Image (cartoon, helix red, strand yellow):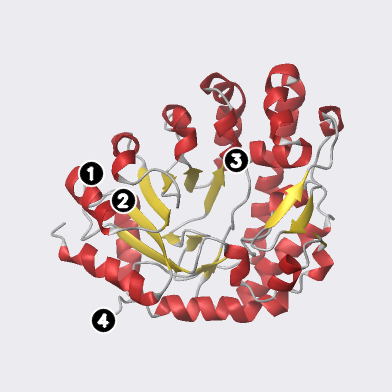
Amino acid sequence: MSLSADEKIKRNLDFWEGNHQERPLMIARLGGVFFSRAFQALIPLLDRRAEIHPEEIIVDDFLPDYERMYQELEQINHDAFFVAEPCTGLPWMECIMGARAYGESVSVVTKPVFSDLEELKGLKLDKNNPWYQKYLEFSSKLTELSQGRFAVGQPILRGVTDTIGALAGQVEMACGLIDEPELMHEAFNAVTDAQRELIADQYAVTKRSHGGYGIGFYHIWTPERIMWYQEDLAALMSPAHYGEYLFETSNKVIEGYPYSLVHLHSASFMHLDQMLEIKDLKAVQINRDVVGLSVREMLPQCQKVLESGKRLVLGMGPIVKDDIDAIYDNLPHQGIAINMISDTPEEAEEILRYVDSKKW
């Protein structure tokens, strides 16, 4: 029997409040890791293998797939409320700040538009940018589609390192930390300010669902507003440079939001200690990558997150039974959410039944 809305809310609150959980908060997402191809309206733009312009993205054509995703996930007996987000397959922050998007068969990529870091001088948000307006159009139309059934939240929004790397080149971004510290501080803060403006404007056109909000992409319910962020290109930084550049922007981007989450890959584990010093950060999402460390291999970092008093979100990759065993045998049974990608509802239900067979 599927959980009621009240039962789901209680389980999500238990996760956030660090209460004993009957099981880890379990969230399923269906489909593969190439999220762009989940949308029929985007496939022709991917297969064309050319630049994608925002006016070519017709939001109404995407809505049937959101409805399908909602209905599919409603059939799974997990702890999540569906959260719709402006198409996760699109590089929103990069394009909002001036990058160009190109279809590459399975995903959308960007190519550098600046040939020199000096061109980053004066980088700032233009709310008239068509990508900015398209993001808000998605948010508004998804809210209409929802009719209160699901929340509308953030998709993947690339962090300040990722965005500057997309605009000027990844190697150039890394070298700029040494060669152009003042310029990089200015550029990083410009991207941070842009994300805060974008999400504030998104909240202005969306509504509560089930009395709260939702973390887009991860589908975790929150009683109050949430901001989440990532810094994948921090993998190219030293811990000293993280402290010099990203500790400030990480504090700044979540300021004023009661709930917050940072997304993290194992390639950036050297920054985890500093991330855990971010006072207002509520949760750390550690990716279970398709090719990479297993949950068992990441247990020391998982334990560190929980010992810091922050919540742990594991996954957004395939979760196998050994991952569940590793969590059950080695981690506290509170403050944990498991976010899994499954090819089919049957595959998701198999893992859910295995989790329920444990005596948490």
- From the viewer's perspective, is the residue at label 1 or at label 3 nearer? 1
Q: Distance between the residues labelled 2 and 1?
A: 9 Å
User: Quick one: label 4, few (<14), some, or many (20+) residues within 10 Å?
Assistant: few
Dot placed on the residue nearer the N-terminal end, 4 or 2:
4
Q: How far apart are marks 4 and 3 (CA)?
A: 40 Å
Contact (CB < 8 A) between labels 2 and 1?
A: yes
User: Quick one: label 1, few (<14), some, or many (20+) residues within 10 Å?
Assistant: some
Above or below 340: residue 181: above
The residue type indicated by label 1 comes to Leu
**Lateral position of residue 330 relative to residue 238, left or right:** left
The residue type indicated by label 3 comes to Val
Q: In which quadrant will I find the C terminus?
A: bottom left
Q: In which quadrant will I find the N terminus?
A: bottom left
* Residue that numbered label 1 is attached to: 331
**Lateral position of residue 299 relative to residue 69, left or right:** left
Query: What residue occupies the far left of the structure in this picture?
Result: 359
* Residue that numbered label 4 is attached to: 1
* Residue that numbered label 3 is attached to: 253
